[in-house]
Image (cartoon, helix red, strand yellow):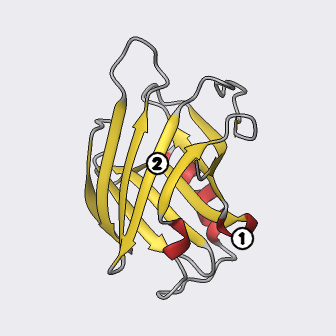
Amino acid sequence: MKKFMLAVLAGLLGSASYASAAPVDGFAGTWVNDNMRSTWSNGQFPKGKMRLKIDVEIHDNHLVYHSINDTAKGKPPMQIAFDAVMDGKSYPVQGTTRYSSVRVRALEGNQLEILEMQGEDVVVGAIWQLQDDGKTLMRWGIGRSPEGKSKAYTEFFSHP
């Protein structure tokens, strides 16, 4: 499974060239998910029910991330946070046991590579891309559930 996820991500990134000075400031701000445009490959995206807010800060080649997911009714919201230098190295994550670290790299243009890691294992591999002149954040990736099932996803976010 790990090899499959890495092969898919490598294929996705195969044509991308990397740049250390990509214009990443556009990712900064508050983003909320767009339920109607977002999809999961297993067809189980909770349309109209998912509530995910992401706050992103960019400074000194760091991506500072904080999210609140309060989709699950009757349960406390899940909050995930990290501060990662955009150098492709691992940095710790708080708020989840699903993955323990994150690796972030700026790609050429308006894209970021985000790898969520459990030890040396990639649990989620994603590309973040700004669209619509920076008004839309699209996250495309492949993630593996705690049960070992993988799915692709495309999630769209806008500024509230």
Quarter location, residue 32: top right
The mark nearer the N terminus, 1 or 2, is: 2
Quarter location, residue 17: bottom right
Q: Amino acid at mark 1?
A: Asp
Residue located farthest toward the top when viewing the structure as drawn: 74
Quarter location, residue 129: bottom right
Instruction: Report the residue at 47% width, 65% height from top.
Output: 28
The one of 129 and 2 positioned closer to us in this rendering: 129
Q: Is residue 32 left or right of residue 68?
A: right
The one of 48 and 44 positioned closer to us in this rendering: 48
The image position of residue 76, as x and y in percent, is 33, 21
Instruction: Report the residue at 70% width, 40% height from top.
Output: 38
Instruction: Report the residue at 54% width, 51% height from top.
Output: 31
Measure the C-alpha gap from mark 1 to mark 2: 19 Å
* Element under disc 2: strand
Q: Amino acid at mark 2?
A: Ile
Residue that numbered label 2 is attached to = 54
**For the residue carrying disc 1, how many other residues have a C-alpha within 10 Å: few (<14), some (14-19), or many (20+)?**
few
Is residue 11 visible in this depiction of the protein? no
Residue located farthest toward the front when viewing the structure as drawn: 160
The image position of residue 110, as x and y in percent, is 62, 74
Check whether the beta carbons of the residues at disc 1 and disc 2 lie within 8 A of each other.
Answer: no
Q: Compared with residue 121, is residue 77 higher up or lower down, i.e. above or below?
A: above
Say the numbered circle drawn on residue 133: 1
